[in-house]
Amino acid sequence: MSYTIVAITACATGIAHTYMAAEAFEIAAEDNAFKIKVETQGSIGAENILTEDDILNADVVIIASDIDIDLTRFVGKKLYQTRPKMAIKDAMALVEIAIKEGVVYADEDSELSYISLGKTSENSFIKHIMSGISYMIPMVISAGLLLAIANIYAFQKDDLGHLVTWGFDKSDPIGNLMYHLFLVGKIGFTLMIPLFAGFVANSIASRPAIAPAMIGAYIANDPSFLGTDTGGGFLSAILVAFLVGYFVRYLKMLPWPKILKPLLPIMILPLLATLFITMVVFYLIGGPIASGMGALYEWLTWLTANYSSSTFIIGAIIGAMIGFDFGGPVNKTALIFGTAVFTDTVAKYGIEGANFVPATAAQAAISVAPLGIFLASILFKNKFTETEKVSANSAFGMGIVGVTEGAIPFAAANPIQMITASVIGSALAGGLVGIFNVKFYGGIGSPLGTFVGYIEQPIPFVTWLFCTLSGITVTALIIGFWRKPIVELNKLKTKQEISEESISIKKIKESP
């Protein structure tokens, strides 16, 4: 194969799938003697950026992305769009499909080929949401860690690790610094909702939609502006983002006078969209959504306070969602819900009255699948090939820092086995932290989190380890008992070969 390929890989978090897909392309190119250059658009930003010459000389452009990618530089080139998972699964097959089925890109409204894990069409709603999440995650992590650092100083515990007082001594230089770090963390959580809305709208209608959506989401979460007790939370941000996005997209389709076109993206469209969403939030959706979200959080708080079993059920559901698709839309939905409940209840009740259950369950479950694979490869060595053991070591490296995507290679090879094991183990981990009233303030979502971060737990260090390792162990046992020994597989293969040889010999003897 003498083709020259250029590709862009990007996932929602910009951490795992982005680089795994790029590596898969590069390995396929090396094994099949074709040229490829891959631009990665990860959380650190665009790397190995495609030049004009790279694009000009390419036979086909492959976009393997879960988020919206600006395609204007590829006008006139054969282009094919898909998901990073498809490149990870079989990069060579994807290249062949792209060469055969790619279409020349004309503009942003062109119909492009798309494949998506067996679905016949792209889910644009999920794609836009994932684009917003990819921009929001760095702010969530940095703000959360700042809150965790400050909380380590602010929370005063008794000998059993229970919270007895909370506050900052601002007369002390360290206490004053921690107080301001805490404020910065709160600012981060305040801004992450408008940031999310801005880039969801950007995914729908590009840059003119960012500012109106951010302003709309901010006022939709400002109780003083709405005259309510709480803001509208993530639900209002999603609604604002889509209203602004499609409103701006409609405005762009109108036949504007040529003299006004230079002003459209920088003044006219942002101004009209901001006026539009302000009226919608203030007079239509702001108050009802805020009241509804306030009632939801009050109900969740009442439920968890009065029925101890409910915390296990809620935690198990969130955990199961985290373990279901290894960093996909269901996983991200659970993360967003947990983050939304935590941040919105902090805003309404303060840190002391925040609902930690969903967010803590998500963090407890996030590393279960990859670490479960690693543990299974240790406990059941005869059921893993040497190549699988190397992949299991890689899964450990990703899982120990809270990256679920390390399980993807095994899930691609044995989806039913891995999904079953991951969902059960992740649900157990999530349910246990719920029923034990563990509170995850920040850090790493893995067993390592008990040492790297701040987690309030009944028995310091031990409870978090027990909950997470329980889920990991159950996942490992399910995988281990489900798989067949490699030796046994070889024996079966040998028996089949012997049988085939016997049939061949018999035919030779019977032939004249």
Image (tube, helix red, strand yellow):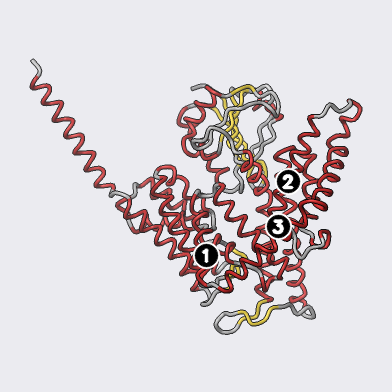
Measured in 3D between alpha carbons, the distance from the residue under mark 2 to the one under mark 3, in whole angstroms, is 13 Å
Label 1 neighbour load within 10 Å: few <14, some 14-19, many 20+: some
Residue 343 coordinates in the image, percent (x, y)? 68, 62
**Amino acid type, callout 1:** Leu
Determine which residue is flagged by label 1. 448
Q: Secondary structure at mark 3?
A: helix
**Label 2 or label 1, whichever comes before in sequence order:** 2
Give the residue at x 48% y 33%: 28
Label 2 neighbour load within 10 Å: few <14, some 14-19, many 20+: many
From where the camera sits, is residue 235 visible? yes
Give the residue at x 46% y 69%: 466
**Label 2 or label 3, whichever comes before in sequence order:** 3
Displayed quadrant of residue 130: top right
Displayed quadrant of residue 469: bottom left
Q: Nearer the viewer, residue 467 or 253?
A: 253
Measured in 3D between alpha carbons, the distance from the residue under mark 2 to the one under mark 1, in whole angstroms, is 36 Å
**Amino acid type, callout 3:** Gly
**Label 3 or label 1, whichever comes before in sequence order:** 3
Determine which residue is flagged by label 2. 241
**Amino acid type, callout 2:** Ala
Determine which residue is flagged by label 3. 233
Residue 500 coordinates in the image, percent (x, y)? 18, 30
Residue 506 coordinates in the image, percent (x, y)? 10, 26
Q: Is 240 on the left or on the right of 374, as rendered?
A: right
- Point out the residue furthest to the right here: 259
Measured in 3D between alpha carbons, the distance from the residue under mark 3 to the one under mark 1, in whole angstroms, is 31 Å
Q: Nearer the viewer, residue 312 or 171?
A: 312
In which quadrant is the C terminus drawn?
A: top left
